[in-house]
Every structure is written in C-alpha cells, then in structure tokens.
Amino acid sequence: MAQTLSLPSLPALLIEPVVRMALLEDLGRAGDITSDAIVPAGTEVEARLVSRAAGVLAGLEVAATAFRLMDPALVVRTHMADGARLSPGDAVATLRGPARSLLAAERVALNFVCHLSGIASATRELADVVAGHKARIVCTRKTTPGLRALEKHAVRAGGGANHRSGLDDAMLIKDNHVAIAGGIRPALERARAQAGHLVRIELEVDTLDQLEQALAVGVDAVLLDNMDPPTLRRAVAMVGGRAVTEASGRITVDTVAAIAATGVDLISSGWITHSAPALDLGLDIEA
Amino acid sequence: MAQTLSLPSLPALLIEPVVRMALLEDLGRAGDITSDAIVPAGTEVEARLVSRAAGVLAGLEVAATAFRLMDPALVVRTHMADGARLSPGDAVATLRGPARSLLAAERVALNFVCHLSGIASATRELADVVAGHKARIVCTRKTTPGLRALEKHAVRAGGGANHRSGLDDAMLIKDNHVAIAGGIRPALERARAQAGHLVRIELEVDTLDQLEQALAVGVDAVLLDNMDPPTLRRAVAMVGGRAVTEASGRITVDTVAAIAATGVDLISSGWITHSAPALDLGLDIEA
Amino acid sequence: MAQTLSLPSLPALLIEPVVRMALLEDLGRAGDITSDAIVPAGTEVEARLVSRAAGVLAGLEVAATAFRLMDPALVVRTHMADGARLSPGDAVATLRGPARSLLAAERVALNFVCHLSGIASATRELADVVAGHKARIVCTRKTTPGLRALEKHAVRAGGGANHRSGLDDAMLIKDNHVAIAGGIRPALERARAQAGHLVRIELEVDTLDQLEQALAVGVDAVLLDNMDPPTLRRAVAMVGGRAVTEASGRITVDTVAAIAATGVDLISSGWITHSAPALDLGLDIEA
Amino acid sequence: MAQTLSLPSLPALLIEPVVRMALLEDLGRAGDITSDAIVPAGTEVEARLVSRAAGVLAGLEVAATAFRLMDPALVVRTHMADGARLSPGDAVATLRGPARSLLAAERVALNFVCHLSGIASATRELADVVAGHKARIVCTRKTTPGLRALEKHAVRAGGGANHRSGLDDAMLIKDNHVAIAGGIRPALERARAQAGHLVRIELEVDTLDQLEQALAVGVDAVLLDNMDPPTLRRAVAMVGGRAVTEASGRITVDTVAAIAATGVDLISSGWITHSAPALDLGLDIEA
Amino acid sequence: MAQTLSLPSLPALLIEPVVRMALLEDLGRAGDITSDAIVPAGTEVEARLVSRAAGVLAGLEVAATAFRLMDPALVVRTHMADGARLSPGDAVATLRGPARSLLAAERVALNFVCHLSGIASATRELADVVAGHKARIVCTRKTTPGLRALEKHAVRAGGGANHRSGLDDAMLIKDNHVAIAGGIRPALERARAQAGHLVRIELEVDTLDQLEQALAVGVDAVLLDNMDPPTLRRAVAMVGGRAVTEASGRITVDTVAAIAATGVDLISSGWITHSAPALDLGLDIEA
Amino acid sequence: MAQTLSLPSLPALLIEPVVRMALLEDLGRAGDITSDAIVPAGTEVEARLVSRAAGVLAGLEVAATAFRLMDPALVVRTHMADGARLSPGDAVATLRGPARSLLAAERVALNFVCHLSGIASATRELADVVAGHKARIVCTRKTTPGLRALEKHAVRAGGGANHRSGLDDAMLIKDNHVAIAGGIRPALERARAQAGHLVRIELEVDTLDQLEQALAVGVDAVLLDNMDPPTLRRAVAMVGGRAVTEASGRITVDTVAAIAATGVDLISSGWITHSAPALDLGLDIEA
C-alpha cells in the first residue's frame, strides 16, 4: 500500500474547471428547480457520503470540490483518502450546510466519485491478482474525453501506474507507423533522431521476429500486443532486461495472472478506464 | 425501428466544443510527436472505421467531427447512421487524407464512438428484452461529467428515451425533498405552486402507501423505486393511467422482462450511462 | 406576495461568469484609468444603492456580485430582496470599501440591476392589473442574448412566471411546424412520439377551428395567438380545462385586463423582456 | 446619410463569440426538440427577414452570423445594410436552407436584430430631431452587459456617435472623483499627469461655476449635466470653443430640440441603449 | 519618481486569467510529478524572491498571484513595489507555505516577474538617459501576444508612458493609410469625420513636407519616423506646440539623448517590449 | 539542415486559440478604427512579408493564421518555411485581399513572427557555433507565459532541441528537491518509485561529488549546472555514457564553443527563449 500513501494529489487548478463545467451542465439555465420550490431557503442539513459496495475510493477531493464550488458554505470533512479500500457502509466523508446547495451538487459529486472509484476498483482488482509478480497494471489513452487527468489519477489510486498522458509526452510507435516508415528500423531511427533527451520510445510488436528487429536497433520499451503467455515468456527472455516489457490485449481478471507469470514488467488495460462499471456510493442525508 | 429513422441529430454547435476539448487534451503542448517524427509530411492514407463486435452505433458524427476538426483535409464518408445495429466487421465509415492528421485524431475519435456505442448497445439490449411490452427504457442524470448531451443522444440511438436533461427542465421530488417538506402533500403542493406551465413533476415513492398519498394530490409521473414485480403490478393498477409510471432500481438484463410485464410505462437505468462497457470499434488503415 | 418570499435565488455559479464577462468588457486592457489617476490608492468610501424611481427590485445579488468580484474587500450589505417594491429614495444596499474598486465596478453593477429591475417592474405592472383574475403573466424566449437566466429570474421577481427556458426543455409547435407537418394532427402526433415523459407540448393556434383540431388530438397547452377577447373567451370555453390556455400578441397595460377577464390561464409578453425600460437606480457615494 | 455609407462593419471575430454563446444558451443540452420531432431531416425552406415596423436597421450581419453558425448550409442574402431606414413590410434579407437549422436559429437571430435595430431607431429618432443643429447624439456606458460593441455599432447605424468604449480608453472625471480629489483643479491635474498622449479628458460639471474652474485649468471636453437650456447656452458661450461640450440628463424626443438649439456639440443619452424598445422584425417562412 | 508612487495597479480581474492560463500550461495533465514524488505532502518551506541583478521591479503582484492561485495556503509578503530600483541581492518578497505548491508555481511566477522586470528595466534605462529633457519614453503595440496589459504596466513601472492600448482606442494614421486615402489631407479629414470626441488622432510623417501638410489640416499628434536629430529639431520648431511630437525609429541607449535634446515630447521604442532581456530574479528556498 | 526539413508543424488546433486571443486583444471593443475610417470598404491590396535582417524564420504559419482568422478572404502564399535562413530583403510570403482586414491583422501577425524568428535566430546562432561538436542546444521552461508550444517550435526551427514541455512530462530533480529529500539517493529512489515507465529522470548537480552519488544510484540524465569547462570535461568522463549530460548556466555565444568542446550532449539556454531580441520582419503593402 506504499504507493497509496504517497499518491500525488491533483492540483486544484486541474480539478476545478472540470467540476465547474459539470455543475453548469446539470444546473442548466435555471438551477435546481425542485429543491428551490420545496426546500426553504435557510434549511441546513447533514449528510454522509457512504460506500454501498466493496471497492477502492478515488475522486473524493473531486466530489468535495463539487460541493464547495456550488456553495462555499458547504463544509466537507473527509474520513478517508483516495486509494482506501471500501466496504459497504463505510462513511467516506461528512457534509454539513445549506440543504438547497447540497441537493443541487449531489448528483455531480456522485457522478465523479462513483465513476473514478469504479476505475480505481477495477485497477485494484487486477493489481491484487498480480500482486505476487513484478508486473504492474498500467492504463492507456482509452480514457473518457475530458477526464484523462482524473482517470489517470484513479488508476494510481487503484494501485496501477500511468502510461503516457497524451500524444506529446512519449513516443509509442504502432503498426501503422512501422508500415508507413517501411520497417521497424527506419521507424525507430526516425523516432530517435527527433526525440528529445527526456522522451522515451516504445514500440508495438506482434511477433518475436519484430521484437528481434526492435532489439537490434534499441528501444526503451516494447509493447507485446496480443501474445499468448508462452510467447510472452519467450519475448521477456529475448529482451533480457534491455527494454521495459509491456503486455497488452484482452486483459481480464481470468487471464492476467498467467500473463504476469511470464515476467513482463507491465500489463496494460484499456478496460479499466473505458469500461469499468461505476462503484456505488451514495449520500445519506439527515434532514 | 421508427424512432431510429427519425433520431434527432445533435447540432454541430453542441458537438464541436466537446470534441475540440478532447483533441486538445490529447495533443497536449507538442502534438503527436510520434507521427510527426516518423510519417513524412505529405503522406496520404485511407482508413475504414470498422466494428469489431456486435452492438449499436452511436456517436459516428462525433467521431467524424474529431477528424474534421483536426484537419479539414480529412474526408469522412459515413456508411451507416447512429442507431444502426452492428456486426463484427461492419465498415461504418471510410476516411481519406493526411496520415499525420488521421493518426493524431484516431484515438479521440475512437474514444467517443466506442463509449457512445457502448451506451447505445446496452440500451438496445434492455430495449430488445422489453420489446413486447409498452415499457420504454429511459436514462437518468447518472452520466459522465461533460458528456450528458452526447450520452442522452446515445440512449436514443439505442432505442431508449430520455429522462430530464438536468436539474432545471423538470421537477423530480425525491425522498429527501419529502422529508424536508414534511410530507408528500406539502412537497407536491409547493412544487406545483412554483412550476411553470411547461414543467412536469415526478415524485419518487418507495411504498404503495406513499403512492396513494401522491395520487390523492395529483402528480404527472411517479418513480416507483426498488419495488418487486408484484408490488409494481399493484402500483400500476392503483395509478390507473392517472400518471406516468417509472420503475427504477437494480435493473438488469435478467430482471427487466419481469418488470416490463408489470405494465409500467418506463424503466430507468443508471447503468446504461455510467457503467456500460465500451463497444469495440477500430480503425483499419491502409498505408 | 407569497411568490416573492420564496423566489428561488439563482446559483452563484450561474451569475458569476456573466458578471465577470461584463466587468472585463468595461475594464478593457487598462482598467479604470480615471479613478487610478485621481483617487489615492488607500481611499475608502461608503455608498448607498438607492432607487430613484418607483418599481420592483431585481438583480440585487447580481450587482453585489459585480462589486465582490471586482474586489473582495468591498463589503455589500443588502437591505431588500429581489421582488421588493421600490419607492424613489429607497436604500437598497450599503457598500463600503476601496474607492477605486467601487468606482470601477459601479457602472456594471448598475447596468445589471437597472436592466433587471426594469423587467421586474414591467412584469409587476401587468401582474398588478390582472391581480383579480387567475391569469399569470409569463415571459417568452425574446430575451437579451446572454442574459436569459437573469431575465427569467427578473420576471419571477416581478410576479410573473416563466415559459420554457430554451429550445430543449419543452415543445412549442408553431405555425411553421404545422405547415411543414401538413396539419395539426400529424404535428402533434410526431411531437408526442418523440417527447420524453417529462416534456410538455404546447401548440400555437390562430383560430378556433385550429383549436378544435388540437383538442381532438390532445395537447398540454395552447397558445392562443392574437385573438380578440370575445374569441379568447370562446376558446377558453372550448378548452374546458383540458389544456392550459395562454394568450399572446400585442399585450399592453391597456389591453391586459380585458384579456385576463376572458379566463385564460396565462398571458405572455415579449415586451417585458425585450423592451422594458431600465429602472433608475443610482449609487450615492460619500467620499 | 454620409455616415451610414461608411459605417464601419464590426470584425467577424468580435461578432462570432457573442452569437455562438447566444445560440448555445437557447439550444441548451438537447437542441430544438420541437423541430427535430416534427420537421423531416431533409426539408428545405425559404424565408424572408421582414420589417414589421418603421425604424432603422442594425445588426443584420449579426443575425446572418446566427444562421451561418447554426448551419453553414443556410444561405443568407442581404438586401439592405445597417443604417437603412425601414418601412413595414421591407424585406431585409432572404434565407434558404435546411428547415430544422433555420427554425433553430430564428429566435436568436431575431433577438439580436430586433434589439439592435431598436437602438438604432431610437438613436435616429433623436438624431432626426436635431438634424438642423451641429449637435450629435452620443451613447454612454449604460449598455447591456456583454453587448457593448454591438450596441455602440447600433448607435452609429442610427446616426449617432460613440462615447468612450469603456473605463480604459478615455478619462471621464465625475463628481465623486472631484470630491475625492478635493476640487476640480487637483482632479484635472492628476488626470493630465497620468494620461497618455492619446487619452482625452472630459469633466462632468453641474454648475457654471464649476465650468469656470475647469476652463481655467484646461480640459478636452465638458459634460454639462442636467442643465436647463438657458444655462446650457451660457455654458457654451463660456467655453467658446475651448472644449467639446456635451449635454446630458433626461434627454427625450420632446426636450432634445431645445437642447440642441443651445449650440452644444454633443447630446448624450443612456436611454437609447438601456431602454429603447425592440424594433419588430420577423421571419416569413415559406415551407 | 512621482509617477512611480502613484503607479496604477492592474485589477486582479485582468491578472488572474493570464496567470491561471500560464499555470495550466506548465502543469499539463499531471502536475509537478517531480515534487509530488519527492516532497512529502505536508512539507512547509520558506523562500525569498531575490533580485540577482540591477534593474527595476515589475510584475510582483503577478508573481504573487501565481503562488496564490496555485495554493491559497501560500502566504506572500511583499517588501517592495513595482517601479522600485533593484540591486543584486535585494529581497523583493518572502513566501511561506506548502513546499509542493511553491515548487510547482515557482517557474511561472519567475517567468512573469523576470520578463516584466526586464521591460521595466529597459524602459528605465532609456528614461534615465533623457531625464533632463521633457521627452518621455513610450511603448508601442509591438508587445507579446496575450501580455499587452501586463507589458504596458511594466513600461509605466519603468518610468515610461503608454501609447494606445490597441487598434480601437485612438487613431494612428500610417503611410499605408495615407497612400490608400490619396494624401494626408483626405486621410486626416476622413479620420476626423469618424472619430469620436474622445478619440485622438496621430499621423506618421517621414518628411518635413508631410509634416507641413499635416499641420495645415490639424492633428493631435505627429509621429516623426526615422528622422535624424537635426531634422527632428526643425520638425519640433515647425509644430510649435500645435501637436504632440513623437520620435520613433531605431531608438537605442546611445542615440536617445540626442533625440531627446531636439525637444520632442515623446520617444517611442518597440524594443523595450519586444526585445528587452529578462531581468534575473530567483527564489531562494530554505527547506 | 536535415532536422529543418522534417520540422514537425504544430497542429492548427494549438495555433488558432493563441492567435485568436491575440487578435481580440488588439481589436478591443471597436476594431481598427483608423482603417475603418480611412480605407474604403472594398479596397484590395497586395503585400509582401519581408525580412529586414539576417536570421532564421519561425512562426510563418502562425502569422498566416492571424491573417486568415481575421478574414478568410485574405489569401496567404508562403515562399519559405520555418527554419529557413533569412537575409535582409527576403520575401517570406505574399498576401492579397481586403485592405482593412490586412491592416487590422498586420501588427499581431508581425508580433508573432518577429518574436518567434528572434528565438529561432538566437538558437541558430548558438547551434552554428557548436556545429562541429556533438552537443545540441536545448531550451528550458523559461518561456513566455502562454507561448510555450510556439516557442519550443521556434527553438526546433533554429536547430535546437526541446527539453521537457512542462512539469508533468519528465522529472527534473533540482537542488531544493534534494535538500528536502535529505540527499541525492533518497531523491532519486523516490523519483524512480513514482515515475511511469515512459518518464525519464534528470538530476541537477553542482559538483563532481554530487555527480558521483547520482551515478551510483543511476539516472537518465544529469544537468551539470554552472561548471567551468575543465570540470565539465571531467564530469563527462565520469559519466562515461551512462547518462545524458547537459551543461547549463550563463551560456553565451562567447562561451558556448568551449563548453561544447567538453563533450557534453546538450547545452541548455534560458536566454534563447526569455531574452532573444525580436527579428525584424515587416509588411510591404502595395496599395
């Protein structure tokens, strides 16, 4: 759990614009007309943010930001931190303040924390399976548009690691690049000629023959795509520590252990960000 | 399938800001450094957007917008329309243009169309199960922050209907509102007193006793939350056409048929927007 | 005055972006060069926001936001609330703080509160005339670009009610829709087939014959456009409570009483938002 | 009419953001749900933008921008230009294109052109009254938040001239500045010491005694506030061409001729921007 | 130094958006990954913002805003004000707060204050040379895109004055305008006919013959472009106080004294904004 | 010159928002009032963008974007590409179109291309001096707020290479990080524990002793700060190819050759981005 303790918190400057946008999306042009009609203006309430399922928490600060941006008079006290394992009934945070504001922000806050905790939980599930191996679970760029920074954070909260953040912070050479370049060697050479000294290069290979070509030129990491465990094992042996090895392709809870057992450094999954079901958390309000 | 034919297309003005934001999120500060290094500037390619699984298409115009915003020289020809049922291998669209631009936009375009098609497919799966009944599948406000308009569109593409768009276009009175108001009657009366003449009011009830109180006051729709099929059936009978009836709570492919058989008008599911797995579509590029 | 007491306050999240934009529009690239040149940096002042005419207050919180966004050191104390009837000389709020900031924000704050109070006052004038009847005054979508939420709020402050907020929260079928659809029946049937269960449908009719067709199909509300009082009276009788009735067209203080006397539910006026003269409020500064 | 011929057109870069914002405000999260439900997707229409009242046109290009931003397939042909005098029935522009898009943009386009033509018409009404005198009608900073550039343009279209654009492009010393500075002389001296060489200074005076003090120091323009015609005439004589003279305060169609007859250079009116009623223009659609 | 004492401070509303944008530009999608990995979350530090060279301070409030926007828990105490002359080692401000936040904001804060102080220092260098003459140093529109307001402020901090802020707050007639108009007289007459009463007009002339034509028509200011000192002296004499005189073209520390000695009112330099080297300031952190 | 040929072009999506912002900054609220007053509306002109000094071109596409965004009717034909060496008089591009639009965009276009070409020229000057050595010139994060992507591009156009883009795409461990961590070893170990597999780590060292500690732990790159050439030479020998070596600190045209001769891989300069003087380019307009 060491990595959870030192989980870097996203700067407020990155969280606030996304949360403000989401609140405005829900408020529309007239705000929470139901609560405005029914709840007297001065009503104060207390509420607890409670987990209704087992999983891993992520996005608590994002949810808290939703309440605070809606109304600075809403006081949020957190009892856990992102990365914490949740059991049904765990109280994650306590809120107190104007009822209208709390009800108006509730859905947006939950949409964030349930979505991000879902990602953290899915990541943790895979990470737990491979816990005895050196392999780490990493995410991809298959994230929800607009939420990449938050989802990458959720992956870390779930015990995973991050792949590149976008198109511009590392080079990932795929089959189409190789085809256009006319081979692995020219692709790698062009990449190295252009890459800054702090830019790493990873190459996707589908076969051991391609892997051999890549190692002959030299590369920082290899993405071993859709290889079965025996092939992966041979690939890891061929690499012999000269590059980071990443396995990808149809990773599931059922297959991930066998893949980790091949000795790869990383196992990447698009599923943990694009298809993880939301984790059920809710708000218990005491009127 | 009538509703598919007349599926309203989202205005470009609503699509473009979201897509532009997503492209900038991926481009970062330096753009697609891999393609820029490896792909010669003038290279042209053709590509096909192909389904790799069975499901329902949604977000094709969003994906096309991603390519066009990245580079107006990218020509997109669509072969299907949102709402179409997909089989593995179906070519959804054909693209032609500068290779660098196509590769730079590929991931964002896919992130949109896979996510939205996942929602449409999940909706369609439920809708097909209840096809013999009058019940329609409807979504909730449990949508991904920033993508509500797109996800509501995907639900329609999947044969579902939309609940309110946000907090301001209809009143949905929940248990907390009732508790604060001190009862169903005062809650409904306050709501009606404030509601504009084009604003409908729906009330969430957990028991038949609450339903009886609501009907005594009068209400446009009732949300029958977490009732089992026998109770739902009695609720529908009690309502007797005086209000729209909506069933909600733990809707799954396994339970939805029994719920539809109770005669409810609507079955709402948060799952179709917050937890539907992405549908696998990919880009086949011919260099 | 019951509706004034429970007037829903717009969320700060909806007010602040509009006010910030307006302040930046006035500050330009160099700020208030007059006050910066003449007023010593540390000067503090007190001021009172005072009505100079009779009318109804609206937008006080918007004006207060202008001062606070310009400088959090500006302290605003309000003595009245939106919806209050104003007489010349009434002190609406008291301000205290840095003179430069107060002078820099003054015009924008006044532009908002005078414009919105003008709308509230015009609405109230009509509302007072029809006070003995059941008819309520409602606004339209003929609002100032960018200010719809604020102007709809001002209408409520003046004792009016709101029509739909925009194109997406209710259906209003106009003559052109009917013409394109080929008749009232197909227009209404297509609308009902597409409308969500919380979306109401209103139809514009110009003649009693059209009204009869509409009632035969069924509709939530009818917009009786440009009918004279006798025709309106017959229309109300024909409807017989089966739909909300709204009268529109050339509503003035002189004609509105006769229209209300016909028994219509609503009387809509574009004039109260697009043409109401500003109410005169000013800032009395004590240097 | 010379000034109309050379009326500077606002750059598209200034018009488009305001129009886009207004369209999004009206489209909300789901667009024009009425037209989408009723109008078949491929329907094309023609329409004419027609004046329904006498007045002066302003904002035609803004309205055209609304249609084009909604859908580039909407073709707008203009028959008149801003500044033209309108009679009821005059066709201002012709449109052709997709019916759904035209209906969706109609209200926003009209909201702009009716509001801005209202300002131009009010300005022209005053300008016509003073046509025999040298006085020109000028606007103030009492404009609608967000629309200053457009409204200043409308004033020019109505034959008026513009006062400063905001707080930063000229100095206007008001009574509060004088009070804080401790007199007219120190206020003017501080202003002149700070003003750039392209910044003009205007001073508001309420009495001839104040005017005398101002002229003794020297100033570019004097704002003669709330003076009656005889006093204004004496003020103009005192100034003797040493400064631009501007009369302000309760300018109406009834009083403006007498004020112009005093020989002042400028007559400023807040009313023409903050209270001018909209001019009635409409869209005649031929389905 | 009087003008330094009363240096108008830019409104926070103008500073904050630029600083927020700059922080987000540096934070990217994941924030300061170095500090997050190495610095424990609770670590507090003190730091001093110190000058490492001689020059003039500008942008201190901008730098302070960078720290505060990154983290309101960062407390900034300033010891000097913009316009102050700096010697190497001068402590300009003291900071205290969370180490991670301080390190994350450091570079952006320094980028602003070093750039703006560079402009102030370059301006002051020229201003000191001409101190015995009436000529003032003024800037141009040759500013860094996005930073005009800040750079104009820095020029004032360096003892300079500002030219117009942009294209819309004064008229500057250049050679191309004259060529298109067909001469100086028509250019000036068209300008005067359109200019508002608070808009000044300046004309660029290259020869004494052009100057004579300009003076014959009348103009507020003349830009004497690229004239040698003897010609400038004759130009000043020809003007005889009837217009502000501004010398421009290849102004350097070596040439500026001779130009000032000609008696011109203003000497404008693009160099002080587009080419002034940054002033070296740094942050001394005490861990 | 190979790297110039394959200079990656920035995506239009990254250029356009910055250019639009700069144009709006200059247009203010009323646009180019000088040209609007003097230049008849239909006037067309031709112009050439010409270098007036020797240097290296950068930002040509940015300048072209300024003209096109101002008015799509402005046709820009480019004759050179970023990275080209310029001599005085070289025609870089030809423009044709509406005179008003061209004059309105001129200054912003020039501000970009002169600023960016200044950076490219300064980079090229250093790069030419070290041409015989393996060392490459690299930039830093000392860039102008808001222009980082453009300035990094200009550095590449000048033959330089890019350091990290921001705080989030690589780790650069500085003296303060080491001090807080309590030594080089813990700092490097914490960094490596958190860094993703595509994130490189660079460490700043001031002494050979520190370098030795760093090499003992292992690191991707070392920043050798403020070392004299003899020390640098020993450092390079100590590293022996185990890490990229980067020299920094007071790099000038006079010192850079001696530093390159030490065998370092990279020489970084903040000066080329924060202090390079603008390159003089101008627009020759043929009316």
Image (cartoon, coloured by chain):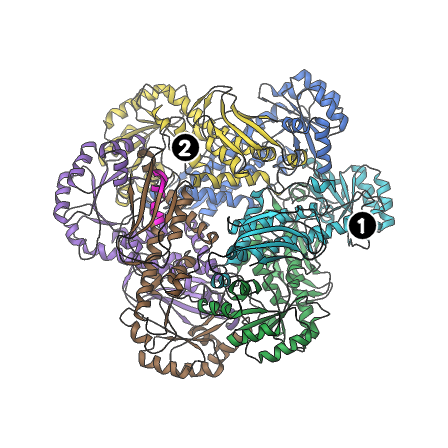
Chain colours: A yellow, B blue, C cyan, D green, E brown, F purple
> What secondary structure is marked by label 2?
helix
- Left or right: where does residue A252 sit relative to residue C106? left
Chain letter, disc 2 residue: A
Q: In this figure, which residue is indicated by the disc labeled 1? A: C129
What residue do we see at 69% from left, 33% from top?
Answer: B201
* Amino acid type for the residue under numbered disc 1: Val
Q: Is residue F90 magenta?
A: no
Residue A153, numbered label: 2
**Inter-mark Cα distance, 2 to 1:** 60 Å
- Magenta span covers which residues? E96-109
Give the chain of mark 1. Answer: C
Discs 2, 1: same chain? no
Dividing the picture into quarters, in which one does residue C188 lie? top right
Helix, strand or loop at disc 1?
helix
Q: Is residue B79 visible?
A: no
Report the predominant secondary structure element of the magenta stretch: helix
* Side of E204 where D4 appears, left or right: right
Left or right of residue F259: residue D171: right
Query: Nearest the camera: A264 or E250?
Result: E250
- Residue B8: percent from the left, percent from the top? 62, 40
Q: Is residue E135 toward the left or the right of residue A79 in the image?
A: left
Residue B116 in percent (x, y) is at 52, 34
What kind of residue is marked 2? His
